[in-house]
Image (cartoon, rainbow, N blue to C red):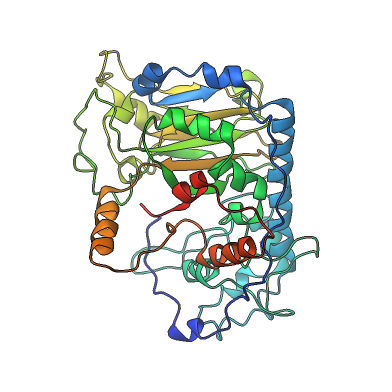
């Protein structure tokens, strides 16, 4: 969904920013035995470059799987508590922050419970704009999300995000800023040696940074899957051809990539195979065509995709391109090139919550690297950090590190969270 909104008004920047001592989430000891070494060692680089994906089946140890599931459940409980108990309608002072208030009809307890609680991708709201209709199940618009990232929705009393007293507010919600709410996931995304080894196999000899990291829980009983779609690398300027063309297949695996790694601690198996559905579908080989499917196939169902694939062959070995639906056992990861078309199957009516997390990493954007190098040469000050993590949280984390309340950033974390 691409809509452009104005930044918060100047009045918003005049609000008191969070004090440097506003606490970050407490540091937690690392879980050393997270992954099974033999699963990491089995990675086949040649096969990954040919297919565009790799299934790390059963990668999590029993302890790692239990911890990942518990962490996703904890984040969901935190977010649901905020959604239910924050006084969105009569407590948060939207005007003082220069923000458009959420639609009042979406702030009733009934709406929030039915539409927003229990899963991910429920909170966002995009108001009607021009010829684009109102979309989104939730009530948080983009200006509010931008404000949460830059300034933080901090306040006192009713004019703040609700917490149950067992965790400090991070001025944001877990779905959009999970690494700020979870030292465990922050470690996995930026520093854990086994996860760095896994990511390093996807980007051999290349520096990579976080493109985004999101909770992808699916609420209990949520049935619809996701249509076939794909994603651009950066803003799409590096795609090799027009978005509605058939593409120019290239057997070479390009070094410039964004690779998504999905974690399913409890697995994802189709209903046909006795599971609850929600399985991932891919088209192995289509990653070599660099088609920006986000626009071309945003509403493609199976029939449309099958028809589009007719006559198309794998760029490397000439075999017909086919849809592949993956059976994902518990404790597994799937890594795949994010511009490759992918799909999520529907879930059965009585399906329990599906717990999942997404790590999306990419090589630095060439134009951003050039701009930063030019600014440095010109003597201009540049940011130490990339745009993914909330700026207000980074300031508070640096303060916590300076006070000795959190371990210093590792060299790896500085690289992964740093600018392009």
* Residue at the spot 40% in from the left edge and 22% down from the top edge: 48
Q: Which image quadrant for residue 278?
A: top right
Q: Quadrant of residue 20?
A: bottom right
| The one of 251 and 92 positioned closer to us in this rendering | 251
**Residue at the (33%, 23%) spot, across then down:** 285
On the question of residue 187 being in view, the answer is: yes
Front residue of 224/12: it is: 12
Q: Is residue 356 left or right of residue 325?
A: right
**How far across and how far down the image is residue 260, in percent?**
46, 37
x, y (%) of residue 314?
28, 19
- Residue at 68% of width from left, 70% of height from top? 161
Q: Is residue 368 above or below residue 133?
A: above
Task: Tell whether 368 sits left or right of 169.
Answer: left
Q: Indicate the quadrant where residue 338 lies.
A: top left
User: Front-most of 343 and 370?
Assistant: 370
Residue at image x 72%, y 48%? 28
Q: Position of residue 363 (x, y in %)?
A: 36, 42
What count of labels does the image hold?
0
Q: Residue furthest right?
A: 165
Q: Is residue 205 left or right of residue 351?
A: left
**Image coordinates for residue 405, horizontal then vertical, percent:** 69, 60
Q: Is residue 346 visible?
A: no
The N terminus: image quadrant: bottom left
Side of 212 where 36 appears, left or right: right
**Image height of 391 relative to 368, above or below:** below
């Amino acid at each position: 969904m691409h809509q452009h909104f104005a930044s918060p008004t100047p009045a918003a920047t005049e609000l008191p920013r969070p004090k440097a001592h506003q606490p970050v989430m407490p540091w937690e000891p690392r879980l050393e035995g997270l992954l099974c070494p033999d699963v990491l060692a089995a990675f086949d680089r040649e096969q990954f470059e040919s297919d565009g994906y790799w299934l790390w089946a059963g990668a999590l140890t029993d302890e790692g799987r239990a911890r990942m599931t518990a962490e996703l459940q904890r984040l969901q409980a935190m977010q649901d508590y905020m959604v239910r108990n924050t006084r969105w309608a009569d407590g948060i002072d939207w005007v003082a922050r220069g923000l458009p208030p959420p639609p009042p009809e979406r702030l009733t307890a009934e709406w929030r419970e039915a539409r927003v609680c229990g899963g991910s991708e429920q909170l966002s709201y995009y108001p009607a704009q021009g010829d684009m209709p109102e979309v989104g199940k939730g009530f948080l618009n983009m200006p509010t999300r931008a404000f949460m990232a830059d300034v933080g929705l901090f306040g006192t009393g009713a004019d703040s995000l609700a917490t149950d007293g067992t965790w400090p507010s991070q001025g944001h919600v877990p779905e959009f800023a999970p690494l700020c709410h979870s030292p465990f996931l922050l470690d996995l995304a930026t520093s854990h040696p086994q996860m760095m080894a896994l990511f390093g196999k996807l980007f051999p000899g290349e520096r990579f940074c976080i493109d985004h990291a999101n909770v992808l829980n699916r609420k209990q009983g949520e049935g619809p899957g996701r249509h076939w779609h794909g994603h651009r690398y950066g803003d799409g300027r590096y795609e090799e051809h027009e978005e509605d063309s058939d593409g120019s297949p290239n057997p070479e695996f390009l070094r410039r990539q964004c690779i998504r790694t999905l974690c399913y601690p409890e697995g994802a198996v189709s209903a046909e195979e006795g599971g609850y559905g929600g399985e991932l579908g891919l088209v192995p080989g289509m990653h070599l065509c660099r088609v920006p499917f986000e626009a071309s196939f945003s509403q493609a169902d199976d029939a449309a995709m099958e028809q589009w694939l007719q006559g198309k062959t794998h760029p490397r070995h000439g075999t017909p391109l086919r849809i592949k639906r993956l059976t994902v056992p518990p404790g597994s990861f799937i890594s795949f090139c994010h511009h490759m078309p992918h799909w999520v199957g529907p879930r059965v009516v009585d399906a329990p919550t599906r717990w999942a997390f997404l790590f999306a990493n990419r090589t630095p954007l060439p134009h951003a690297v050039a701009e930063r190098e030019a600014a440095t040469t010109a003597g201009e000050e540049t940011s130490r950090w990339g745009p993914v993590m909330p700026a207000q949280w980074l300031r508070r984390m640096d303060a916590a590190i300076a006070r000795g309340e959190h371990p210093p950033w590792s060299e790896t974390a500085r690289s992964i969270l740093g600018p392009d």
